[in-house]
Image (tube, helix red, strand yellow):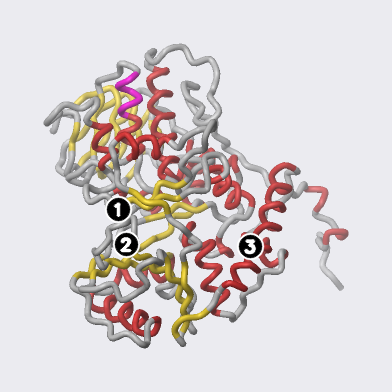
Amino acid sequence: MTECRRTTVAILGAGVAGITAAQALSNASVSEFLIVDRNDYIGGRVELGANWVQGLGSEGGPENPVWTLAKKYGINNTVSNYDSILGYDEDGATDFSDLFAAFDEAYAIVEQDSGYVLTDNQQDTSMRAALSVADWKPKKDMRAQALEWWNWDWETAWPPEQSGFAFGIAGYNLTFYQYSDENNFVWDQRGFNTFVIGEANEFLEKNDSRLLLNTVVTGISYNSDGVIVRLEDGGCIEAQHAIATFSLGVLQNDVVQFDPPLPRWKREAIEQFQMGTYTKIFLQFNETFWDRDTQFFLYADNKTRGYYPVWQSLSTPGFIEESNIIFVTVVDGQSYRVEQQTDEETKAEVMEVLRVMFPDRDIPEPLDFKYPRWSTEDNWPVGMTLEKHQNLRSNVGRLWFAGEATSAQYYGFLHGAWFEGRDVGMRIAGLLGQGGNYSECDGNSTIGCGTMMNYTVLNGTTFPDEYNVDNGWSDGVSE
């Protein structure tokens, strides 16, 4: 029988949450930990997934920690100018300006309404219903559908009908109003994970035995005494605490087996929260045949919503000039579809769209073509309450969870993973008697407050005595 390797904390995942948790432990003088990752590199999905620093910071206000780290490591990035956009449909170039104005007007109403839902404890609804009440109803207008995709789906990876209203708006505002409305696109040739590697190198030594790359977790056993992590190679790790930074998709698809099974309150929260697929498709040509001074190009397909809708140029001044690179993003169903296709099939489709967009140009075949097949985005679904989301966050005894999805305020943003990793690392350090005496929670991440709150029972909003004929409900049979 294989003898388990023993440690104090097992950190499962070397992405932003995992490395930040390890750094928090190290800063609190907890050096006995192991970091496990299935990949052969540090950084998780940051390598090819996240490419923006979203919400930088404002003068005199807080600064996004990811922006702080991007500056620290000199990561090349350029501000995304969302006013630098041209529109296209099946006839080539078109003008979307009237639709932009109409959506902005409706969104202003929606944003105000969402505040009332939160502050007055009103029942939540879907983003689709909220937009419809504000008189934004794109229906079969494919140009309006494309404009809506640009404003909503592109950020969330889910359509409005599957997105929660109040927390969908709040999640956006907490980043872009608290920090700033700036989005900077990272185009550093070293990769966006440069800052994650840099932070890891501050507490890990070269060839550090505490870093286990190319190591796959298959199972986790846990009880009140500790955690045993089982590995694909037959090995195991025995720890006092474990931090699972797996993506929501890994948890939902039972990639890792838990023994005993996670409690019902935990499983319900995992299954309800949403993880969408977000795919960027890159093409490089021998020339820049699109407008060199424009950053974005919005395409409205005449049949299918979200069919290769948003194109972004990297040849624009301030990016990788003279690279002749453009990429297009798809999400949700279209993302799942292209991930099942061959490169040649997808390339044929995107080239057909480009030739529709630019009918007067003789567009050559690309010199290079590439797209990753694993980028994800977390989204707050319809019906998810703050309490049920807390169940997603909460530890189960000595087994902890951290990542973008577990952040109530910054889910779907990279800094959400940073805050959650730091939070869990400091909580465990506090339970181990390290890291100082934290008698209060801080405003962002409840640092040092021990184990987390969870809700074994979550009640609805309708009380038993309200199931009556006045509300269209009768115990009897109609005659």
Count of numbered tags: 3
Q: For residue 51: magenta?
A: no
SS class, disc 3 = helix
**Which quadrant of the rendered structure holds the N terminus?**
top left
Amino acid beneath label 1: Trp
Could you tell which of marks 3 and 2 lies nearer the N-terminus? 3
Magenta segment main secondary structure: helix
In depth, the one of 9 and 255 nearer the eye is 9
Tags 1 and 2 touching, CB below 8 Å: yes
Q: For residue 24: magenta?
A: yes
Determine which of the numbered discs, if any, sits on residue 187 in the image: 1
Measured as percent of width and height from the top left, residue 59 is found at 52, 34
Q: In this view, does 142 lie above or below 110?
A: below
Tags 3 and 2 touching, CB below 8 Å: no
- Which residue corresponds to the image point at 39% horizontal and 23% vertical from the top-left? 428
Amino acid beneath label 2: Leu
**Which quadrant of the rendered structure holds the C terminus?**
bottom right
